[in-house]
Image: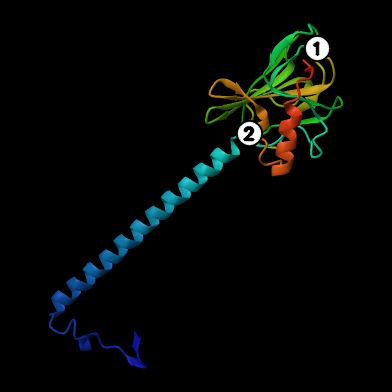
Amino acid sequence: SIRRGKRYDIAEDPRLSYLSSTELAAQLRRDVEALQHRIQTQQQSYDTLQQLVKAKEKMLASIPAIQPISNKNLKHVASGFGYRIDPIYKTPKMHTGLDFAAPVGTPVYATADGVVRATTYERDGYGRHVIIHHGYGYQTLYAHLVRIKARPGEKVKRGQVIGWVGSTGKSTAPHCHYEVIRNNQKVDPVHFFFNDLSAADYERMIRMAASTNQSFD
């Protein structure tokens, strides 16, 4: 090595001058081992940090975060979560999802990464519908589809088309009935569009979804 423009002679280092060749070799070996241990520890810390980042990214990708249909202008919100007037029986009934009115054939998107748990048809209920299991306690349901693209067991990504809007089952007009299930409890989907909405749009959607109107199913 070079020190201040001239070749560095280890024998001239006052810290090591009192050591014999054998002791000097042993000291250098210990220094190298200590350095290797430090590098190994830092690498392990880096690997652990990478794993934590990947786990966090996976969790965030698995939480419902967009609307199930393209709805930038929010004009498709038809009926919200809570007690609404049943369109057939005309009596108050708990509406466990959010209705998005749209023409038949409008694409319906998975709102988070997950695995398709079921693609089912109910004549008098949800009609053709898809249930996606996202992990971390989350599931989503997409109902009244005219046609289903997703298949049971298929892995899907957020934004992937899983079917198309229809009016199958107990439905009075073309729409997508969308539900979010967290820890086996149906919760208000309006709070799970944070990748889609600005703060102003979120407040506007909350007001629209809170309207005590008639549901579509």
First in residue order: circle 1 vs circle 2: 2
Q: Give the amino acid type for the residue marked by disc 1 in the picture.
A: Pro
| Above or below, 63 relative to 35 | above
User: Which of these two is toward me, 162 or 198?
Assistant: 198
Q: Residues within 10 Å of mark 1 (few under 14, many from 20)?
A: some
How far across and down, in percent of the image, does residue 183 sit? Answer: 53, 24
* Image disc number at residue 64: 2
Task: Describe the element under mark 2 as helix, strand or loop.
Answer: loop
For the C terminus, the image quarter is top right
Q: Is residue 68 visible?
A: no
Task: Describe the element under mark 1 as helix, strand or loop.
Answer: loop
Q: Give the amino acid type for the residue marked by disc 2 in the picture.
A: Pro
How far across and down, in percent of the image, does residue 118 sit? Answer: 65, 19
User: Which of these two is toward me, 11 or 185?
Assistant: 185
The residue at which mark 1 appears reads as 87
The answer to which image quadrant residue 128 occupies is top right
Judge from the rendering whether residue 39 lies leftward or rightward of residue 161; answer left or right. left
Marks 1 and 2, how far apart in space?
Answer: 28 Å
Point 79% across, 17% down: residue: 214
User: Which of these two is toward me, 94 or 185?
Assistant: 94
* Image disc number at residue 181: none
Point 14% across, 75% down: residue: 23
The answer to which image quadrant residue 147 occupies is top right
User: Which of these two is toward me, 158 or 66?
Assistant: 66
Viewer-nearest of discs 1 and 2: 1
